[in-house]
Amino acid sequence: AVKQNRGNSYQFYNSEINARTVNRQNLERQLREAVSKGELQLLYQPALSLGNGRIIAAEALLRWHHPERGLLLPEQFIGVAEETGVIVPIGEWVIHHACAQMKLWQDGGFDLSLAVNLSNREFHQPHFLEQTLTALSETGMKAGTLQMEIPERAIMENGASSRQNMLRLTEAGVAFCVDDFGVGSSSLQRIRQLPIAKLKIDRSFIRNLENPDNLDVVTAMICMSHSLKLTVNAVGVERPEQLELMQNYGCDEVQGDLIGRPLPAAEFEGMLARRSAR
Ligand code: C2E
Ligand code: MG
Ligand code: MG
């Protein structure tokens, strides 16, 4: 009986792994095709300056219109894309597409920056610098209005060339932000060593600002950012009370559903026009 049991559970285990592998292989193949089939889309979420009340940036957020599964969020495919390396061609599509869109908006007279997200692997891949400079030159978007958001965890990884790449791009005008700030274990030392312009406080801290402990942490993050001469952005502002707290505690900018949900380019432009961001 014991033998039988072990046999069964082994088989079960095996077929479960096989199913997962097949799923991953399917997902990987479908992801590779997603770019050429035009299944990827960027939505744009506004960032509001609390200093002047203007929309100062658009963050590009990736969506995948999967042929069978419908609309997928990054959390449903970025992980596999990272592990398989498909994130590199996807990231290339993202930066080109986002910069081309921003160039159109800038030519239309809208004055705002573009924020693009990078995953760990994209940031550390050998063509990162060249790919970014190519996207800027091919689209003609002003480098001075490009912000690159790097997850806290990727910043902390000490890639040999990452600091050099950041310095080169900073010289060209690109600004770097630490994304998801507060969830990883970042060292202030490392942040000081790198050309970083902004910290984006993770949504998990903003969610429960009514909780005095969370509010203490967030106000400390704001003070710390300012001591380090960094701009600070609070992500995930959904309620007026959160906006008011961030205003009172001197946060520089906010993002969240209260300000604006991520929108397709045409709708985002409509929102900009209504707010007369021109
Ligand atoms: P992130 O860069 O931290 O972006 C913020 C996420 O929070 C976005 O989720 C946004 O839609 C969501 N969010 C913002 N404000 C609110 C709010 O008030 N309420 C709620 N419930 N959610 C809010 P999204 O679009 O699902 O993206 C998740 C993550 O996927 C991003 O987190 C980013 O790390 C990654 N990502 C998105 N686009 C790209 C991309 O083009 N390339 C790479 N490598 N990663 C991307
Ligand atoms: Mg981001
Ligand atoms: Mg995040």
Image (cartoon, rainbow, N blue to C red):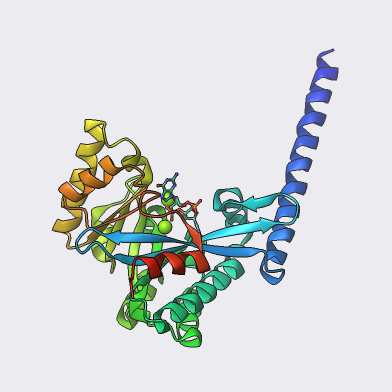
Question: Residue 80: in sight, yes or no?
Answer: yes
Q: Quadrant of the C terminus?
A: bottom left
Instruction: Depth check: give the residue in front, 56 or 79.
Output: 56
Residue in the image at 39% along x and 62% along y: 149
Asked if residue 176 lies left or right of residue 89, the reply is left
Q: Position of residue 167 (x, y in %)?
A: 32, 76
Q: Is residue 58 above or below residue 145?
A: above
Q: Position of residue 240 (x, y in %)?
A: 29, 43
Asked if residue 32 lies left or right of residue 120, the reply is right
Q: Quadrant of residue 116?
A: bottom left
Q: Is residue 143 above or below residue 26?
A: below
Residue in the image at 50% along x and 64% along y: 267
Asked if residue 128 lies left or right of residue 242, the reply is right
Q: Quadrant of the N terminus?
A: top right
Q: Position of residue 235 (x, y in %)?
A: 35, 50
Q: Position of residue 88 (x, y in %)?
A: 58, 68
Quarter of the rendered structure image containing ligand 2: bottom left
Q: Is residue 236 above or below residue 274?
A: above
Instruction: Depth check: give the residue in front, 33 or 164.
Output: 33
Question: Residue 148: in sight, yes or no?
Answer: no
- Count of marks overlaid on the render: 0
- Residue projecting furthest to the top: 1
Residue in the image at 36% along x and 44% along y: 238
Asked if residue 260 lies left or right of residue 227, the reply is right
Residue in the image at 50% along x and 79% along y: 100
